[in-house]
Image: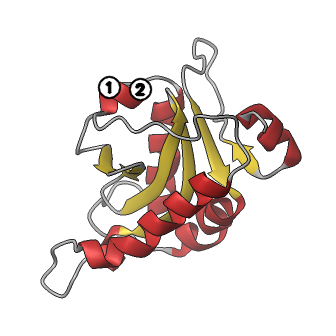
């Protein structure tokens, strides 16, 4: 078994590290899988703005990740949504990034999707469209060679932050 830092050094996960201002320091940790990283770098910048007209989707995700690792307040249901037993979605106005918490204040982003692609014809989100994302998170968490426990099962944001 291995630690998250060892997995990061191997390259199986990439640690998210924003550019810091002089007075800023990291308070939490976020890792991104290679699949999610590729999606964030190659697909997300091409997506148009939808609900948020001030930031492009890739900028929204970058801002949310930066807020997370800098320890800024995260709002349940606005910034994160829990999908029992282990999956969570980091949320922006236009984007959902699915992952889980292997350790307190440590998020692993596994995959992502545009909000509009997770909505049914009536504009309401539907669990059926979320299922592949949630299953990808569960499979990744189960298969990651990580020292136990492999993931937290807290149901509130305070339990995992």
Q: Which residue in the structure is indicated by mark 1?
A: 158
140 is higher (above) or lower (below) than 62: below
| Vertical side of 78 occupied by 133: above or below | below
**Where residue 151 sits in the image (x, y, percent)?**
52, 40
Q: Which residue is drawn at the image coordinates 64% and 14% (left, top)?
A: 22
Q: Regarding mark 2 in the picture, which secondary structure is present there?
A: loop
Whether residue 118 sits left or right of residue 40 in the image: it is left
Q: Nearer the viewer, residue 84 or 107?
A: 84
Q: Residue at x 65, y 63 (%)?
A: 41
Location of residue 156 in the rendering, given as x and y in whole percent from the top left corner: 28, 34
For this view, does 158 lie left or right of residue 27? left
- Please identify the quarter of the rendering in which residue 110 is found: bottom right
Secondary structure of residue under mark 1: helix
**Vertical order, 14 against 106 (above or below):** below
- Residue 161 is tagged as 2
Residue furthest bottom in the image: 121
Q: Nearer the viewer, residue 93 or 121?
A: 121
Question: Which residue extends farthest right?
Answer: 10
| Side (left or right) of 16 relative to 88 | right
Q: Position of residue 97 (x, y in %)?
A: 46, 57
């Amino acid at each position: 078994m291995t630690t998250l830092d060892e997995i990061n050094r191997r390259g199986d996960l990439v640690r998210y590290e924003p550019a810091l201002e002089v007075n800023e320091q990291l308070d939490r940790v976020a890792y991104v899988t290679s699949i999610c990283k590729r999606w964030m770098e190659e697909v997300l910048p091409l997506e148009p703005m939808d609900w948020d007209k001030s930031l492009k989707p890739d900028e929204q995700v970058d801002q949310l990740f930066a807020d997370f690792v800098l320890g800024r307040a995260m709002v349940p249901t606005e910034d994160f949504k829990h999908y029992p037993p282990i999956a969570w979605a980091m949320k922006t106005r236009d984007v959902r990034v699915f992952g889980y918490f292997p350790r307190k204040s440590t998020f692993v982003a596994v995959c992502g999707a545009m909000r509009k692609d997770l909505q049914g014809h009536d504009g309401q989100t539907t669990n059926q469209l979320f299922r592949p994302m949630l299953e990808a998170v569960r499979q990744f968490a189960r298969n990651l060679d990580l020292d136990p426990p492999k993931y937290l099962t807290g149901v509130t944001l305070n339990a995992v932050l």
